[in-house]
Amino acid sequence: MTIKHKMWLVAITCIVTAGCVSQPVGPAVAVMPGPNKPFIVFEQDDALCRRYAGQQVAGGAREANAATVGTAAVGTALGAGLGAAVGGGQGAAVGAGTGAIAGTAVGAAPAQQSQWNLQRQYDIAYMQCMYARGNQVPGFAAPAVPAPPAPSSPRP
């Protein structure tokens, strides 16, 4: 394998692995069952709210990864162009590899921020859903549970 092929292999590997943002797999917050709520009902709420939160952030990881891969691709193209201008064909290969690595590195910080934002959006949607279903969410008072109706007295 020539050095040109090795550098292109490195460049392609960097571009493919640049997409490191993933869809959240679950909440990063602890929610407790509401007062007097049976645990089985809490589990049903949890499953429903996980689905809801997942729908709210659907596609977010794909969009963040596309931006990261785009940054790496631009770095590869710029590096190849600069390398070709300076060193001809072999310079283009070296420039492409260097550009891919630099583009991936530049895209890594925004990807990490995107992952944090995606998890945060998921957690907010999850907490909103769980709170609306009467569960205890960190930082908020437990939802008020209506008092049971007073027993009615028999009518004469």
Image: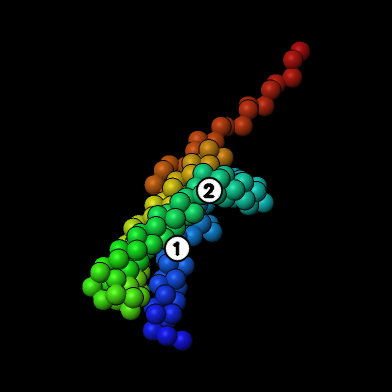
Per the image, label 2 sits on a secondary structure element best described as loop
Question: Which residue in the rendered view is the most extreme toward the bottom?
Answer: 1
Q: Is residue 112 left or right of residue 155?
A: left
Tell which circle, 2 or 1, labels the residue nearer the N-terminal end. Answer: 1
Per the image, label 1 sits on a secondary structure element best described as loop
Q: Is residue 46 left or right of residue 16?
A: right
Q: Is residue 83 left or right of residue 4?
A: left
Q: Mark 1 sits on what residue?
A: 19
Q: Quadrant of residue 155?
A: top right
Q: Position of residue 124 (x, y in %)?
A: 44, 46
Q: Position of residue 112 (x, y in %)?
A: 37, 61
- Judge depth for marks 2 and 1 and give the one in front: 1
Q: CA distance from mark 2 to mark 1?
A: 16 Å
Say if residue 94 shows up in the picture: no
Question: Which residue in the rendered view is the most extreme toward the top?
Answer: 156
Q: Count every numbered label the image shows and give the total.
A: 2
Q: Amino acid at mark 1?
A: Gly
Q: Quadrant of residue 101?
A: bottom left
Say if residue 56 shows up in the picture: yes
Taking the spot 56% from the left edge, 32% from the top edge, the residue there is: 146
Question: Which residue in the rendered view is the most extreme toward the left?
Answer: 86
Q: Few, some or many C-alpha atoms within 10 Å of disc 2 (few <14, some 14-19, many ≥20)? A: some
Q: Amino acid at mark 2?
A: Ala
Q: Nearer the viewer, residue 83 or 149?
A: 83
Taking the spot 59% from the left edge, 48% from the top edge, the residue there is: 51
The circle drawn on residue 59 is none
Taking the spot 44% from the left edge, 48% from the top edge, the residue there is: 121
Q: Position of residue 134 (x, y in %)?
A: 55, 40
Quadrant including the C terminus: top right
The circle drawn on residue 58 is 2
Taking the spot 29% from the left edge, 71% from the top edge, the residue there is: 84
Q: Position of residue 58 (x, y in %)?
A: 53, 48
